[in-house]
Image (cartoon, rainbow, N blue to C red):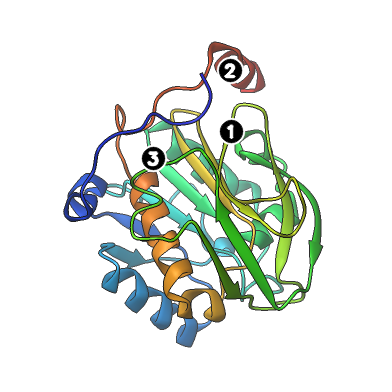
Amino acid sequence: MKGFALISLSLASLSALASGNVYVMSSGNDAFDNQLMSSLASNGVNATLGVRFGDLNESTDLTGFSAVYAQYNYNWNLDSITAAAQNRLISFLGTGGGVVTNEWVMWRQPSLLLPYMPTTYQSYRGATEATFTKTTADNPTINAGLPDSFTFSLTNLSGSESHLVAKEGATTFYRSDHAADAAGLAGWDVGGGRVFNFSPVMGELEIADPNMSRLLANTLNAAAVPEPGAFAALGLGVLVLLRRRK
């Protein structure tokens, strides 16, 4: 079975479902971090601002958090995605947590994390806007309050959006107009938890857009669903493959 099981959720139930504990890795840009945290709060996400990617390691305490927004954008030229940071996220997944990433993470191709990512990186572009279109893989948490298709401005941080293609067994929730096979948002269950990839850099212009800011908040809520939760397990073939990769 591919993708995630559908469940009936009201908008009012989203925050309770997410258990209100999301760890947001800092972008390294204070003004943007303030914008992001304000946006998440206004969209019902109980988030805590944490360390930058370069400072994440096995000693970073993620106790009590259900999801991590592995944000990497304004700090792309300041922080590397270290092995220690990757191992911390992998161990967090092993506890049933969720991880959400953005464009620069996939562009960096962090080797330890790649088997856990629901997409593969193809290329990137410097477009000024993108259009996301909902796929048939409807999910009431992720799609809540959003139109079937919307166009938004892209932040350019030495590039604005990656061409990501969903792996076999992953679910594409929104297509991007970047290419015919481009996933704007894709996710899957993996490593004991859940991982979602966004194709844009998710900077100030995306967060200023009401649809994209809502989509990020919805995705963080979905990532924070504890196991067993709203998402069904993937097919046995994918599970066996991931076990072999450990």
Drawn side of residue 246 relative to residue 227, left or right = right
Which of pointers 1 and 3 lies earlier in the amino acid sequence? Answer: 3
Tell me the crowding category of disc 2: few under 14, some 14 to 19, or many 20 or more residues within 10 angstroms, Cα based.
few
Numbered badge on residue 28? none
Q: Residue furthest right?
A: 123
Per the model, the C-alpha gap separating discs 2 and 1 is 16 Å
Drawn side of residue 96 relative to residue 90, left or right = left
Which of pointers 3 and 2 lies earlier in the amino acid sequence? Answer: 3
In the picture of the structure, the residue carrying the numbered disc 1 is 170
* Tag 3: amino acid: Gly
- The answer to which of 145 and 77 lies nearer the viewer is 145
Above or below — where is 189 with respect to 238? below
Counting from the top left corner in percent of width and height, residue 117 is at: 62, 40
- The answer to which of 10 and 47 lies nearer the viewer is 10
Counting from the top left corner in percent of width and height, residue 124 is at: 79, 62
Q: Nearer the viewer, mark 2 or mark 1?
A: 1
Identify the residue at horizontal 36%, vertical 75% (top origin): 39
Tell me the crowding category of disc 3: few under 14, some 14 to 19, or many 20 or more residues within 10 angstroms, Cα based.
many
Per the model, the C-alpha gap separating discs 1 and 3 is 17 Å
SS category of the residue bearing label 2:
helix
In the picture of the structure, the residue carrying the numbered disc 2 is 243
* Tag 1: amino acid: Ala
* Tag 2: amino acid: Arg
Q: Is residue 60 visible?
A: no
Tell me the crowding category of disc 1: few under 14, some 14 to 19, or many 20 or more residues within 10 angstroms, Cα based.
many
Numbered badge on residue 97? 3
Q: Nearer the viewer, mark 1 or mark 3?
A: 1
**Position of the C terminus by quadrant:** top right
SS category of the residue bearing label 3:
loop
